[in-house]
Amino acid sequence: MVQDLRSLDLSEMLQLMEELNEPAFRAKQLFAWVHNKEISSLDEASNLGKGLLEKLSQKVLISSLNIVKKQVSQDGTTKFLLALPDGNYIECVLMCYRGDRSKKRNTLCISTQVGCAMGCGFCATGKSGFTRNLTVGEILGQVYTVNNFLSQEKDGYKIGNVVYMGMGEPLLNYANVIKSVRLLNSKDGQNISMRRITISSCGIAPQIKKLADQKLDLVLAISLHAPTNELRSKIMPINHKYPLEKLKKACQYYNEVTKKRITFEYALIKDFNDQPQHSKELAQFLKGIHCHVNLIPINSVPGSSFTRPSKKRIYEFLREIKELGVEVSIREEKGTDIDAACGQLRGKVVN
Ligand code: SF4
């Protein structure tokens, strides 16, 4: 079977070179070409020599992703529609922050599955159902493709932050997601610090515990969105399987094992989860979890009747839970005008 080089780590490349009767240093060279220099074709690996390139081409390929469409928001956020080798589509979103020099950074929000089986009521991805998991190479390919775009069209800054918050539930593509995280973090690859990598989950309790046991220094974000089982089950079907009590236990286990705080995402929906009683219930649920809450005024999604509360109510909600001792902020929203914000990705060609 022909393997995708972007899905291979150094130990697998070493094994490949061994099979080809090549010295180990060749694996390191190949790794740098693939995961650091982000080549999209083997021919670009100029120092490997013609003979080795020929042998490699019998066994491996580089499955590159093609940019089918690019939409740029008024705030500069860019959404990419990417075609996968099998004809499926995914989306990823580039957010460029350009403050003073120390604050310049590019963040890429990436997808982990084609579609999603979780069916969250406020999310466009969930509406089209689940097709398949992405491979490691396809997850990383989003970063490499956008880096390539940045080197040609922007000011030379690469992606420095990666958030696994695009299409799909990352913890249900666990092995590929963790391998891709380790490759992004590899010092001979992208060398992106673990602290600059965020994995977001809708709350798959056993997988949260499994992630805790890896003791990675990354950021875990949980989509909470409602403070009671009754409300949460209305918008997040996963809550039937892993209700808040189970989720809370998994989060406390995560705190205990990793010593890291968790980020909770709370999409504020008018007349649904934005009332004073909800801020009290939210603070009550969060008691005993080391965490920070991001309030996200909900984004509109076609076919959904949810709307965001008034600005006044958003700030009141913020104050209410702050006064109850919760660390909280309102998340800066980007790309809403091009459907690139939270819950708006669809992975479809729309003209
Ligand atoms: S919010 Fe995340 S987990 Fe829920 S349906 Fe959308 S992509 Fe899936």
Image (spheres, grey):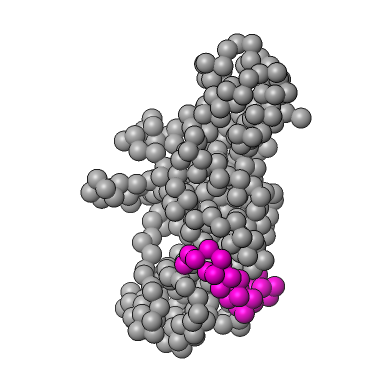
Query: Residue 237 appears in which quarter of the rendering?
Result: bottom right
How many marks are shown on the rendered structure?
A: 0
For the residue pair 28 and 314, the one nearer the viewer reads as: 28
Residue 317 to residue 112: above or below:
below
For the residue pair 117 and 70, the one nearer the viewer reads as: 117
Q: Main secondary structure of the magenta part?
A: helix
Q: Residue at left 49%, top 55%?
A: 217
| Residue 246 magenta-highlighted | yes
Residue 201, visible in the rendered structure:
yes
Which residues lie in the magenta part? Answer: 235-261
* Residue found at the far right of this picture: 1
Q: Position of residue 247 (x, y in %)?
A: 60, 73
Q: Position of residue 59 (x, y in %)?
A: 71, 24
Q: Residue at left 59%, top 22%?
A: 26
Q: Residue at left 48%, top 64%?
A: 260
For the residue pair 170 and 307, the one nearer the viewer reads as: 170
278 to the left or right of 211: left
